[in-house]
Amino acid sequence: MIDSPRVCVQVQSVYIASQSSPDDERYVFAYTVTIRNLGRSSVQLQGRYWRITNGHGRDTEVQGEGVVGEQPHIAPGEEFQYTSGAVIETPLGTMQGHYVMVDFHGEQFLVDIPVFSLAVPGQIH
């Protein structure tokens, strides 16, 4: 597998207070991912890997096929966007990882998902 600059990933996260319970150390976050194909040929997202780190430094790894039940094909110049969620035990944490993609030749490559924060508003100064 090779790394590829042809795909750009951006992530935004938001705290979901209505589903969280700080007294029970349950902090729920939604994150929206936008995957843009900057290349000249179609790609398909086949799998994902996440490392979720809570505020105590405890890591949880998640991996699997596709995202939100899909293995989307993304045409050149197009984007795919989805929203998912994460639950951690602290008001601050991070997520990062990679997607396993396949190009039109059937070659697999990895696309890094840059680290992003999971933060209850007011926790980061």
Image: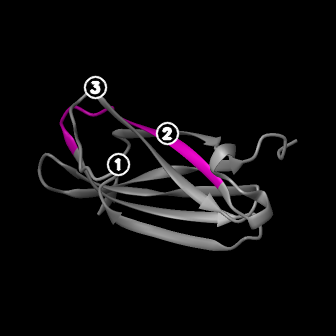
Question: Which amino acid, mark 2?
Answer: Thr
Q: SS of the residue at dot 2? A: strand
Q: Along the line of sight, which residue is nearer the eye, 62 or 8?
A: 62
Q: Along the line of sight, which residue is nearer the eye, 41 or 99?
A: 99
Q: Are marks 1 and 3 in contact (CB under 8 Å)?
A: no
Q: SS of the residue at dot 3? A: loop
Q: Is residue 4 above or below residue 41?
A: below
Residue 77 is marked as 3
Q: Quadrant of the N terminus?
A: bottom left
Q: SS of the residue at dot 1? A: loop
Q: Quadrant of the C terminus?
A: top right
Question: Which amino acid, mark 3?
Answer: Gly
The nearer-to-camera label among 3 and 2 is 2
Q: Position of residue 68 (x, y in %)?
A: 34, 50
The alpha-carbon separation of the residues under discs 1 and 3 comes to: 15 Å
Residues in magenta, as a range: 28-43
The alpha-carbon separation of the residues under discs 1 and 2 comes to: 22 Å
Q: Is residue 31 above or below residue 21?
A: above
Left or right relative to 41: residue 47: right
Q: Is residue 37 magenta?
A: yes
Which quarter of the picture shows residue 58? bottom right
Q: Which residue is mark 2?
A: 32
User: Which residue does the image show at 55% across and 56% down from the upper left?
Assistant: 86
User: Which residue does the image show at 78% across and 40% down from the upper left?
Assistant: 121
Question: Which amino acid, mark 1?
Answer: Ser
Q: Position of residue 79 (x, y in %)?
A: 33, 31
Left or right relative to 74: residue 18: right
> How packed is label 3: few (under 14 Cα within 10 Å), some, or many (20 or more)?
few
Q: Which residue is mark 1?
A: 4
The nearer-to-camera label among 1 and 3 is 3
